[in-house]
Amino acid sequence: MNQNKFELILNSLSETNNLGAKLGKSLIGGEVVELSGDLGSGKTTLVKSIVSASGSKEHVSSPTFVVSKEYKTPKFTIHHYDLYRLDDEGLIANELSDHYIDDNSVTIIEWGSNFSDVLPERRVIIKLSPISENARRVEITYPDNLEYLIKELRA
Ligand SMILES: Nc1ncnc2c1ncn2[C@@H]1O[C@H](COP(=O)(O)OP(=O)(O)OP(=O)(O)O)[C@@H](O)[C@H]1O
Ligand SMILES: [Mg+2]
């Protein structure tokens, strides 16, 4: 699958929220989003804005200790994973692959980079890097068939 890449700078929390809102509105179901970046780079913050823009009123918090949480939206269920504390991918591999093939599910994964064997090729990877307290560099990698998620972000 041909992979595309682009970069943008978010100068404030509200610009991050804006990015998440655009993404949340573009999701149709069946997508997988991998969020990478160090502790405190803004992964869970981005999930909050994605979930809320998808039409869910559910509260988003970090699933670091419970591994996964889910949020119902009018269009699909968002499965939010944090694999930071996971040491055996075997425990979630089946569960994840069930979501990937389900058009009523969107899967968002924090700290997935150690488990790329269980992540699908068809996914958007968003890498957040702090450049100051409130600014972030964002690198987005995505295959051609997820271009529809990204085109709004370029505008
Ligand atoms: N532009 C920005 N984008 C995202 N977060 C920002 C920004 N500016 C400041 N922040 C702050 O940075 C913190 C990011 O924390 P968050 O929990 O989202 O990080 P995380 O990447 O999920 O960390 P962890 O790896 O521990 O799960 C929040 O307190 C947020 O308010
Ligand atoms: Mg987090």
Image (cartoon, rainbow, N blue to C red):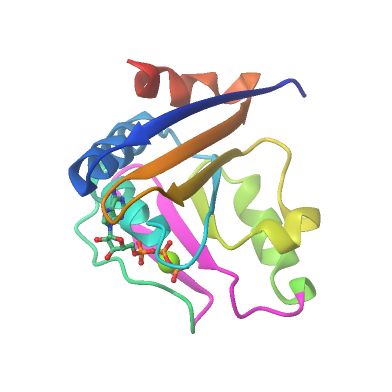
Q: Look at 32% across and 71% down and name the residue there.
A: 61
Which image quadrant is residue 113 in? Answer: bottom right
Residue 113 or 1: which is nearer the viewer? Answer: 113
Task: Name which residue lies at 30% across and 66% down.
Answer: 60
Q: Residue at x 73, y 63 (%)?
A: 114
Residue 20 picture location, percent across and down:
32, 41
Quarter of the image where the N terminus is located: top right
Which residue is situated farthest in the bottom direction here? 65
Which region shows up in magenta?
A: 66-88
Residue 57 sits in quarter: bottom left
Ligand 2's image quarter is bottom left
Q: Is residue 87 magenta?
A: yes
Residue 105 seen in render: no
Look at the image and tell me in which quarter the C terminus lies. Answer: top left
| Picture coordinates of residue 139, whole percent (x, y) | 52, 36
In the image, residue 52 lies at what x, y percent?
Answer: 23, 50
Q: Is residue 35 above or below residue 125?
A: below
Task: Tell me the quarter of the picture where residue 25 sits.
Answer: top left
Residue at 41 percent across and 58 percent down: it is: 41
Residue 131 lies, with reference to residue 39, above or below; the image says above
